[in-house]
Image (cartoon, helix red, strand yellow):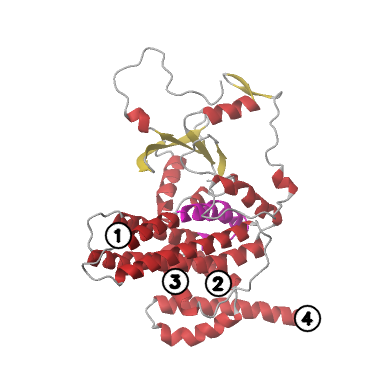
């Protein structure tokens, strides 16, 4: 009897996942939400975050693009958010999930401050003075931009651990949504920098891009707390949570800092063991100790990342001023999962061209956070011409671009911290 009961539960879950997929497809095809809402509500009353994840995984496994799955899940969330309620769990203070939740609560307060300032502007007469609420609006926007640290930890540390368990559909969908929010925040920031806007124009900003952006930010709170974090608690091991905890400082904290209380597993705490100094690595042109080799990589004025022949991240250098943050959690991760979904097509094309021998170098140069950055990809091959992987070299060339004439006399441009 017990076996039959378990079998029935499994079958019911599979049936609910299939039904969810069918309903979401109908919504996406244009069927009015009112026509399927009752059925969807009944299904969701019996479901949990794991079945939402399973639905997304199946849709993507069937070949549905990330963008379509994302828009479907937005509709699903709008219809069911008053029904799908996550059961609160007691989490140790300082645990990564505790920090994610506390950051969301702090961000909610920032969003509330923005909405209050926007509301004050909306109540002004056309010839009113918007300077005071506008100042609060801009300050709150600056605070909200701290959300990037939250997203980076989620995308690079948390998602990479989930992918080890075969869960990559939800992370792709959520990362794509994060990128949409980033783009909207950038647009809102550009609007808030205006110095000559009228009260009427500020009202239009509040009604349009600002309101849409804040709604999307709030929607992500809901998805993280009701789907992503409960699922992660079910799936990840204590060692993996310890790993996420140990790499998190590389990305920083969003508005609030972790509380005291969480102690990661000892194995993770000992991740920074001292390197052996006696052993030497023999190379065709000399030999180095492991300590010397690591220090050379750390000293180079470029950031290196090596992706092996199976498209998995095998190594990255750790300099003091990395341009793009890296976490040890990405080691062994498919490089496609380390990039925003909208850029994966370019990544795949480069790797395919390198692997097939059609190309060996790809270059990009971009403006990034006030720096001019040169990014180069090189196909790495052995002496037989066999493809071993791809090396990414990233360099801040802001200063190099400004060089003129010659310097033939010794001149130091900086003083080291320690003599």
In the image: residue 310, left or right of residue 274: left
Circle 1 sits on which residue? 131
| Residue count near mark 2 (Cα–Cα under 10 Å), binned few <14, some 14–19, many ≥20 | many
Residue nearest the viewer, comparing 281 with 50: 50
For label 3, the SS is: helix
In which quadrant of the rendered image does the N terminus lie? bottom right
- The mark found on residue 52 in the picture is 2
Residue nearest the viewer, comparing 291 with 255: 255
Residue nearest the viewer, comparing 254 with 155: 254
Q: Position of residue 359 (x, y in %)?
A: 40, 38
Which circle's residue, 4 or 1, is located before the other in the chain? Answer: 4
Circle 3 sits on which residue? 74
**Which tag is nearer the camera, tag 2 or tag 3?**
3
- The mark found on residue 61 in the picture is none
For label 4, the SS is: helix
Magenta segment includes 141: no
Residue nearest the viewer, comparing 132 with 86: 132
Which circle's residue, 2 or 3, is located before the other in the chain? Answer: 2
- Taking the spot 70% from the left edge, 36% from the top edge, the residue there is 273
| Residue count near mark 4 (Cα–Cα under 10 Å), binned few <14, some 14–19, many ≥20 | few
Q: Which residues are magenta?
A: 146-171
Which circle's residue, 1 or 3, is located before the other in the chain? Answer: 3
């Amino acid at each position: 009897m017990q076996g039959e009961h378990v079998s029935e539960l499994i079958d019911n879950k599979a049936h609910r996942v299939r039904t969810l997929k069918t309903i979401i497809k109908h919504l996406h095809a244009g069927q009015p939400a009112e026509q399927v809402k009752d059925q969807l509500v009944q299904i969701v009353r019996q479901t949990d975050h794991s079945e939402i994840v399973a639905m997304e995984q199946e849709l993507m496994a069937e070949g549905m693009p990330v963008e379509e799955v994302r828009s479907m899940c937005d509709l699903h969330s709008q219809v069911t958010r008053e029904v799908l309620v996550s059961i609160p769990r007691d989490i140790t203070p300082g645990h990564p999930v505790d920090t994610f939740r506390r950051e969301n609560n702090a961000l909610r307060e920032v969003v509330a401050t923005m909405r209050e300032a926007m509301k004050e502007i909306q109540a002004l007469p056309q010839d009113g003075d918007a300077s005071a609420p506008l100042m609060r609006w801009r300050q709150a926007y600056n605070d909200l931009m701290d959300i990037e640290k939250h997203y980076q930890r989620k995308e690079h540390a948390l998602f990479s651990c989930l992918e080890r368990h075969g869960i990559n559909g939800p992370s792709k969908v959520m990362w794509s949504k994060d990128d949409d929010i980033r783009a909207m925040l950038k647009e809102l920031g550009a609007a808030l920098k205006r110095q000559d806007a009228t009260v009427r124009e500020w009202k239009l900003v509040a009604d349009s891009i600002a309101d849409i952006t804040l709604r999307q930010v709030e929607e992500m709170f809901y998805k993280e707390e009701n789907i992503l974090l409960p699922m992660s608690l079910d799936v990840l091991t204590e060692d993996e949570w310890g790993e996420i905890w140990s790499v998190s400082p590389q990305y920083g904290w969003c508005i609030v800092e972790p509380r005291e209380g969480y102690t990661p597993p000892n194995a993770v705490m000992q991740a920074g063991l001292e390197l052996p100094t006696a052993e030497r690595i023999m190379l065709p042109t000399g030999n180095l100790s492991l300590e010397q080799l690591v220090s050379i990589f750390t000293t180079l004025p470029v950031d290196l990342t090596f992706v092996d022949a199976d498209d998995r991240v095998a190594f990255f250098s750790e300099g003091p001023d990395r341009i793009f943050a890296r976490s040890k959690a990405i080691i062994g991760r498919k490089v496609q999962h380390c990039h925003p979904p909208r850029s994966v097509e370019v990544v795949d094309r480069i790797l395919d061209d390198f692997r097939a021998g059609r190309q060996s170098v790809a270059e990009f140069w971009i403006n990034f956070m006030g720096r001019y950055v040169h990014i180069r990809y090189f196909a790495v091959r052995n002496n037989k011409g066999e493809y071993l992987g791809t090396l990414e070299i990233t360099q801040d060339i802001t200063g190099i671009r400004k060089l003129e004439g010659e310097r033939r006399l010794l001149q130091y441009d900086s003083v080291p911290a320690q003599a």
